[in-house]
Image (spheres, grey):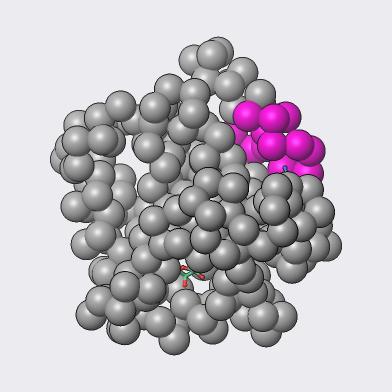
Amino acid sequence: MKLILLGAPGAGKGTVAKLLTELDGSVQISTGDILRGAVAAGTKLGKQIESLMKSGDLVPDDLIMDIMAQRLQEPDCEQGFLLDGFPRTIPQAEALKSLLEKLGIELDMAVNLNLEREVILDRLTTRRTCSNADCQAIYNVKSNPPKQEGICDKCGCPVIQRDDETAEAISHRLETYNEKTAPLIGFYENEGLLLNVDAAGSSEAVLTAIGEKLGAR
Ligand code: AP5
């Protein structure tokens, strides 16, 4: 499958993407994970973007498009991909459209995960993420805690709160989402690709809604 996952911070994009990869071998491509990996590794890109990410600002479109133009041409994308956190602005969506046309790739859907602000705030403040940049497994102290407190089930590394999970950064990320990313819902509606899904239910319910729509195509 070739999907875009849209939704506010904390709506469940990463969680749903990881579950979808288990269905047919499509690969999750999370720009957030890629960028956090660059920060953790202290690369030139990582140093350039560290303060932007910590405060909840977006990374410039041209840097993101350089990363994604390369990533989408890697062989593992042939089986399918789940774009998690990308595109994030109208210019990114337009650039992605041109890139996919050039590569001869057709998207199946852009899935928009809808969630109320109060639930988003609750999920973000209770989320925990594996500190291993190659793992970045997602947990939640309420709904999905690791088996051993503070330790990742998958790789055994410490499970932490992300640098952008301060109250100030969360509020800034939500403002940035409303201003720059929410307009993508209209963009993909115009493209005839939008599927709105209620993300307040279980992850399984979200997967079922996506699966039903894909099956109907
Ligand atoms: P990114 O990593 O993409 O963060 P985000 O969009 O803010 O989204 P999150 O990862 O916070 O949330 P999510 O929707 O994946 O929710 P999750 O599944 O974890 O981006 C981080 C930063 O990188 C940006 O601020 C920006 O600086 C930069 N960046 C990234 N991409 C960029 C781009 N394209 N352009 C420019 N800059 C970019 O779930 C949240 C919690 O809820 C978890 O604890 C989970 O366990 C729980 N949960 C999930 N689903 C359910 C459910 N159904 N029921 C109960 N709990 C659930």
Residue nearest the observer in this picture, 130 or 111: 130
166 or 40: which is nearer to us? Answer: 40
Q: Position of residue 144 (x, y in %)?
A: 73, 47
Quarter of the view holding residue 50 = bottom left
* Image side of residue 116 versus residue 146, left or right: right
Task: Answer with left or right where residue 181 lies relative to residue 91.
Answer: right
Residue at 59 percent of width and 48 percent of height: 153
Where residue 123 sits in the image (x, y, percent)? 74, 59
Q: Can you tell me which quadrant of the image ligand 1 is in?
A: bottom right
Residue 54 at least partly seen: yes
Residue 101 visible in the displayed image = no
Percent of width and height locating residue 201: 79, 38
Q: Which residues are magenta?
A: 189-207
In the rendered image, the quadrant that contains the N terminus is: top left
Residue visible at 75% across and 63% down in the picture:
126
Residue occupying the point 20% across, 32% down: 104
